[in-house]
Amino acid sequence: MTPSTERGLFGFSGWWMSMPAWMGLIAFLHAVGLAGVVLYDASLVLDLTVFNLLLSTIVVLGFGDPKNGGRWTMTGYITYAVEVLGVQTGFPFGDYEYGSRLGPHIYDTPPMIGVLWLITLSGAVYWAERLLTGGGTALHRMGRAAIAATIMLAFDLIMEPVAMMADFWNWAGDDIPLRNYAAWWVIAFLLAWLWGGTRSRSFRTNRAGGLLLLVQTAFFIGLLLLPWTS
């Protein structure tokens, strides 16, 4: 689907429902948020994280194919369940606990983390599809899954130190274990492979997800490199 033929947000028409309009708004809000953390009050801005994630998710799903509703739901539930397991047992990520900034907790785990997995995976599989185009063989499917998992891992390497600084979650001893990164890669690979078939192609071609991942990456790099105002 080319930019000229992209459906509007939730299928509505008009420039105000176009992807450039909404992704421009998302980029603007992230830029304002970064400026707020650096120049105004980091705590106040970061307390709005849940609202930012919800808006970003609505936009990504709004430009997606409604036929992927089941895939979106399964991705969110699977990753949330794995995170609950991780918090309760330490497997597979390591010993960690969530702070308050990702919203209410169920079983000591915010359901919003499943949403974060979903939108990040949406972006990763989009870029994997762009980088390894064509080919419906099992080898191509595994290759795209490996690329998507590596993109997810690269994003997590940037996000993890910021997440601790922002009290999204905290690791025991302030030490991020290597197995966390290994688990991220494996889980992302399995999900990307699961949605790697021909019938799931529209799940992998949501440009809004790909653009959001770029915006979020730039946002976390900014938070990682720039000083914060308390």
Image (tube, rainbow, N blue to C red):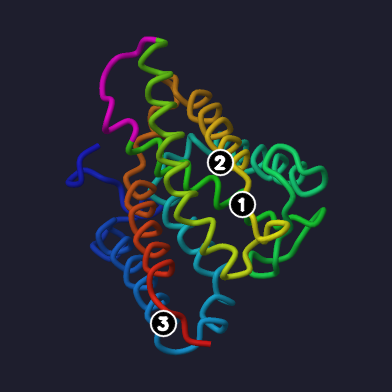
Q: Nearer the viewer, mark 1 or mark 2?
A: 1
> In the picture, residue 165 is in which quadrant?
bottom right
Which residue lies under the disc numbered 2?
181
Q: Residues within 10 Å of mark 1 (few under 14, many from 20)?
A: some
Of residues 4 and 162, the one nearer the viewer is: 162
Which is more foreground, mark 3 or mark 1?
A: 1
* Mark 3 surroundings within 10 Å by alpha-carbon count, few (fewer than 14), some (14 through 19), many (20 or more): some
Q: Which residue is at a point 35% across and 50% down the rendered structure image?
A: 208
- With respect to residue 23, does 182 lie above or below? above
Q: Is residue 150 one of those drawn in magenta?
A: no
Q: Residue at x 74, y 49 (%)?
A: 95
Kindly identify which residue carries mark 1.
176
Amino acid under label 1? Answer: Ile
Alpha carbon separation for disc pair 3 and 2 = 28 Å
**Label 3 SS:** helix
- Asked which secondary structure carries label 1, the reply is loop
Magenta residues? 128-137
Residue 143: x percent and y percent?
38, 21
Tell me the amino acid under the disc marked 3: Val
- Of label 3 and label 2, which has the lower sequence position? 3
Precedes in sequence: disc 3 or disc 1: 3
Mark 2 element type:
helix
- Figure check: 131 above or below 174: above
Label the magenta part by its dominant secondary structure.
Answer: loop
Q: Residue at x 66, y 37 (%)?
A: 78
Q: Look at the numbered discs 1 and 2 and tell me whether their residues touch, using CB distance below 8 Å.
A: yes
Badge 2 density bin: few <14, some 14–19, many ≥20, Cα 10 Å: many
Q: Position of residue 205 (x, y in %)?
A: 34, 36
Label 3: which residue? 38
- Which image quarter: residue 94? top right
Name the residue located 45 percent from the left edge and 60 percent from the top edge. 56
